[in-house]
Protein backbone atom coordinates (compact mmCIF):
# COMPACT_ATOMS: atom_id res chain seq x y z
CA UNK A 1 0.00 0.00 0.00
CA UNK A 2 1.17 3.50 -0.79
CA UNK A 3 1.94 5.73 2.15
CA UNK A 4 2.56 9.42 2.73
CA UNK A 5 4.95 11.02 5.16
CA UNK A 6 3.68 13.38 7.85
CA UNK A 7 6.27 14.75 10.25
CA UNK A 8 8.60 11.90 9.30
CA UNK A 9 6.06 9.12 9.91
CA UNK A 10 4.38 6.99 7.26
CA UNK A 11 0.58 7.00 7.02
CA UNK A 12 -1.55 4.87 4.75
CA UNK A 13 -4.47 6.83 3.32
CA UNK A 14 -8.02 5.53 3.64
CA UNK A 15 -8.40 4.98 -0.10
CA UNK A 16 -5.34 2.69 -0.05
CA UNK A 17 -6.75 0.80 2.94
CA UNK A 18 -10.09 0.36 1.13
CA UNK A 19 -8.46 -0.91 -2.08
CA UNK A 20 -6.46 -3.44 -0.08
CA UNK A 21 -9.53 -4.52 1.91
CA UNK A 22 -11.62 -5.07 -1.24
CA UNK A 23 -8.82 -7.05 -2.93
CA UNK A 24 -8.12 -9.30 0.06
CA UNK A 25 -11.66 -9.68 1.48
CA UNK A 26 -14.11 -9.39 -1.45
CA UNK A 27 -16.92 -11.13 0.45
CA UNK A 28 -16.69 -8.97 3.58
CA UNK A 29 -18.82 -5.85 4.10
CA UNK A 30 -18.23 -2.28 5.23
CA UNK A 31 -21.28 -0.41 6.50
CA UNK A 32 -21.47 3.11 7.87
CA UNK A 33 -24.15 4.62 10.07
CA UNK A 34 -24.71 8.30 10.76
CA UNK A 35 -25.26 8.48 14.52
CA UNK A 36 -25.62 12.26 14.75
CA UNK A 37 -25.97 14.92 12.08
CA UNK A 38 -26.53 18.62 12.60
CA UNK A 39 -25.55 21.80 10.81
CA UNK A 40 -22.53 21.91 13.17
CA UNK A 41 -21.18 18.35 13.36
CA UNK A 42 -21.48 14.73 12.29
CA UNK A 43 -20.80 11.47 14.13
CA UNK A 44 -20.45 8.25 12.15
CA UNK A 45 -19.75 4.62 12.94
CA UNK A 46 -18.36 2.12 10.46
CA UNK A 47 -18.56 -1.63 10.98
CA UNK A 48 -16.66 -4.30 9.08
CA UNK A 49 -18.18 -7.76 8.99
CA UNK A 50 -17.23 -11.07 7.45
CA UNK A 51 -19.37 -13.09 5.04
CA UNK A 52 -21.39 -14.54 7.95
CA UNK A 53 -22.30 -11.05 9.20
CA UNK A 54 -20.07 -11.24 12.27
CA UNK A 55 -18.72 -7.77 13.09
CA UNK A 56 -14.93 -7.86 13.16
CA UNK A 57 -14.14 -4.20 13.81
CA UNK A 58 -15.69 -0.78 14.18
CA UNK A 59 -14.51 2.79 13.89
CA UNK A 60 -16.05 6.07 15.05
CA UNK A 61 -15.50 9.63 13.86
CA UNK A 62 -16.65 13.09 14.87
CA UNK A 63 -16.31 15.99 12.44
CA UNK A 64 -17.04 19.63 13.13
CA UNK A 65 -18.35 21.61 10.18
CA UNK A 66 -16.22 24.68 10.91
CA UNK A 67 -13.03 22.67 11.57
CA UNK A 68 -11.64 23.14 8.06
CA UNK A 69 -12.39 24.63 4.66
CA UNK A 70 -13.35 21.22 3.26
CA UNK A 71 -15.62 20.44 6.22
CA UNK A 72 -17.72 23.53 5.50
CA UNK A 73 -19.45 21.53 2.76
CA UNK A 74 -18.35 17.92 3.43
CA UNK A 75 -18.32 17.33 7.19
CA UNK A 76 -20.52 14.22 6.90
CA UNK A 77 -18.42 12.73 4.11
CA UNK A 78 -15.21 13.34 6.06
CA UNK A 79 -16.71 11.70 9.13
CA UNK A 80 -17.67 8.67 7.04
CA UNK A 81 -14.19 8.40 5.53
CA UNK A 82 -12.52 8.80 8.93
CA UNK A 83 -14.68 6.18 10.62
CA UNK A 84 -14.02 3.76 7.73
CA UNK A 85 -10.29 4.37 8.04
CA UNK A 86 -10.42 3.71 11.78
CA UNK A 87 -12.45 0.51 11.31
CA UNK A 88 -9.92 -0.73 8.76
CA UNK A 89 -7.07 0.19 11.11
CA UNK A 90 -8.74 -1.69 13.98
CA UNK A 91 -8.79 -4.70 11.66
CA UNK A 92 -5.03 -4.23 11.23
CA UNK A 93 -5.10 -2.75 7.73
CA UNK A 94 -2.82 0.19 7.03
CA UNK A 95 -1.34 0.76 10.46
CA UNK A 96 2.36 1.07 9.91
CA UNK A 97 2.82 3.57 12.73
CA UNK A 98 -0.60 4.76 13.89
CA UNK A 99 -4.32 4.05 13.83
CA UNK A 100 -4.99 7.74 13.12
CA UNK A 101 -5.72 8.81 9.57
CA UNK A 102 -3.58 11.40 7.83
CA UNK A 103 -6.40 13.95 8.22
CA UNK A 104 -6.62 13.25 11.95
CA UNK A 105 -2.88 13.80 12.30
CA UNK A 106 -3.03 17.08 10.34
CA UNK A 107 -5.94 18.29 12.50
CA UNK A 108 -4.19 17.29 15.72
CA UNK A 109 -1.06 19.21 14.68
CA UNK A 110 -3.17 22.27 13.82
CA UNK A 111 -5.05 22.05 17.12
CA UNK A 112 -1.78 21.80 19.06
CA UNK A 113 -0.54 24.95 17.30
CA UNK A 114 -3.81 26.73 18.14
CA UNK A 115 -3.45 25.74 21.81
CA UNK A 116 0.19 26.92 21.90
CA UNK A 117 -0.79 30.24 20.29
CA UNK A 118 -3.65 30.69 22.77
CA UNK A 119 -1.29 30.05 25.69
CA UNK A 120 1.19 32.63 24.34
CA UNK A 121 -1.58 35.20 23.94
CA UNK A 122 -2.86 34.52 27.46
CA UNK A 123 0.64 34.80 28.95
CA UNK A 124 1.24 38.09 27.14
CA UNK A 125 -2.05 39.52 28.44
CA UNK A 126 -1.34 38.22 31.94
CA UNK A 127 1.98 40.08 32.12
CA UNK A 128 0.85 43.56 31.02
CA UNK A 129 1.63 46.95 32.54
CA UNK A 130 -0.96 49.26 34.02
CA UNK A 131 -1.21 52.98 33.15
CA UNK A 132 1.46 53.85 35.78
CA UNK A 133 3.98 51.53 34.12
CA UNK A 134 3.74 48.95 36.90
CA UNK A 135 3.90 45.34 35.79
CA UNK A 136 0.69 43.62 36.69
CA UNK A 137 0.34 39.89 36.77
CA UNK A 138 -3.14 38.50 36.52
CA UNK A 139 -4.21 34.93 37.20
CA UNK A 140 -5.03 33.01 34.07
Image (spheres, rainbow, N blue to C red):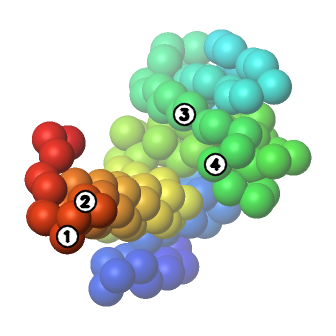
Gap between marks 2 and 4 measured at Cα: 37 Å
Q: Position of residue 110 (x, y in %)?
A: 46, 64
Q: Determine crowd level at label 2: few under 14, some 14-19, many 20+ residues with C-alpha closer than 10 A.
A: few
Question: Could you tell which of marks 1 and 4 lies nearer the N-terminus?
Answer: 4
Q: Is residue 2 above or below residue 33?
A: below
Q: Front-most of 30 and 126?
A: 126
Disc on res. 107: none
Q: Secondary structure at mark 1?
A: loop
Residue ID at (34%, 82%): 7
Residue 133 visible in image:
yes
Disc on res. 130: 2
Q: Is residue 5 above or below residue 95?
A: below
Callout 2 touching callout 3 (CB < 8 Å): no
Question: Could you tell which of marks 4 and 3 lies nearer the N-terminus?
Answer: 3
Q: Is residue 15 above or below residue 8?
A: above
Gap between marks 2 and 3 measured at Cα: 47 Å
Residue ID at (58%, 14%): 53
- Left/right placement of residue 69 relative to residue 130 reads right
Question: Could you tell which of marks 3 and 1 lies nearer the N-terminus?
Answer: 3
Gap between marks 3 and 1 measured at Cα: 50 Å
Disc on res. 133: 1
For marks 1 and 4, give the one nearer the viewer.
1
Give the residue at mark 4. Answer: 67
Gap between marks 1 and 2 measured at Cα: 5 Å
Q: Secondary structure at mark 3?
A: strand
For marks 2 and 3, give the one nearer the viewer.
2
Give the residue at mark 3. Answer: 61
For marks 4 and 3, give the one nearer the viewer.
4
Q: Determine crowd level at label 1: few under 14, some 14-19, many 20+ residues with C-alpha closer than 10 A.
A: few
Amino acid sequence: MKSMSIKGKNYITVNERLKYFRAVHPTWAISTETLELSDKHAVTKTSISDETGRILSTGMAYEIREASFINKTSWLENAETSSAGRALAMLGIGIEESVASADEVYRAIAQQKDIENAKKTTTTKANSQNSDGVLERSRV
